[in-house]
Image (cartoon, rainbow, N blue to C red):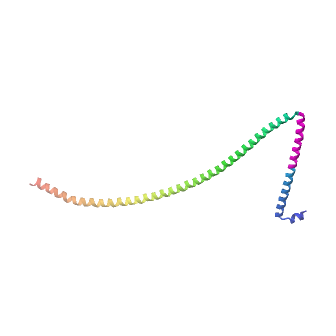
Amino acid sequence: MKEAQSLISSEGKSELKETIREVIAEEFKDLKSKLLNELKEQLRRDQAFWESILGPSALSMHERHIGVHDNHYEEIKVLREELNKKHIELLERIVRVETELKNQRELIKAFMESVDKRFEAVDKRFDSMDKRFEELTKYVDKRIGTLEKLMFAFNVPMLLGIMLLLWKVFIMP
């Protein structure tokens, strides 16, 4: 037996298992159909027995009652299938919403990064404007200092001239 098992490869073993499963499934189907046929035959015999005891009207009422329950079972089965479909649809929708939210998060993250870059560029511009303003302030201060010196230099002789004129007019007439 071990020699035979060692001769069969792993692929052969899986094929053998599959064949055995198929044969068992086929036999099970045959057995199932035989049992169902036997059960139907037994029910027919029982129906004849109960009709002889209760009469055909009682049995038909019982069959109608069973038929109502069968209809309820079918309705419940249909409702269950509809609920399963809706459940699957909701799950698919949840997945779509989650992927869309993920995409939105990525877009927001990219947008925030671009805004940060723009702010950095604006900060650089302000820094360069500050430097230019400081240079301009220094240049204006230098020029105003020069003008003040010149004004002082021109004002001194003018003041002396005015004072001399006033001296000659009022004090030495």
Measured as percent of width and height from the top left, residue 77 is found at 75, 43
Quadrant in the picture for residue 7: bottom right
96 in magenta: no
Q: Nearer the viewer, residue 19 or 59?
A: 59
Q: Residue drawn 87% across and 47% down?
A: 37
Provide residue 84's location: percent of width, then percent of height.
Answer: 71, 46
- Judge from the rendering whether residue 146 lies leftward or rightward of residue 158; answer left or right: right
Residue stretch in magenta? 32-53
> Which quadrant of the figure has residue 161?
bottom left
The residue furthest left is 173
Horizontal relation, residue 36 to residue 90: left or right: right
Between residue 139 and residue 95, name the one nearer to us. 95
Q: Main secondary structure of the magenta part?
A: helix
| Residue located 76% across and 40% down the image | 71
Q: How many marks?
A: 0
Residue at 34 percent across and 61 percent down: it is 139
Q: Give the quadrant of residue 65.
A: top right
Image quarter of the N terminus: bottom right
Q: Residue at x 14, y 56 (%)?
A: 165
Query: What is the residue that sits farthest to the front in this orientation?
Result: 56
Residue 47 colored in magenta in the image: yes
Percent position of residue 164, x then y: 14, 57
Q: Quadrant of the C terminus?
A: bottom left
Residue 53 point in image, percent of width and height: 90, 34
In front of the other: 98 or 18 = 18
Up-down: is 129 above or below 92? below
Instruction: Give the left or right position of residue 69, taking residue 103 as reference.
Output: right
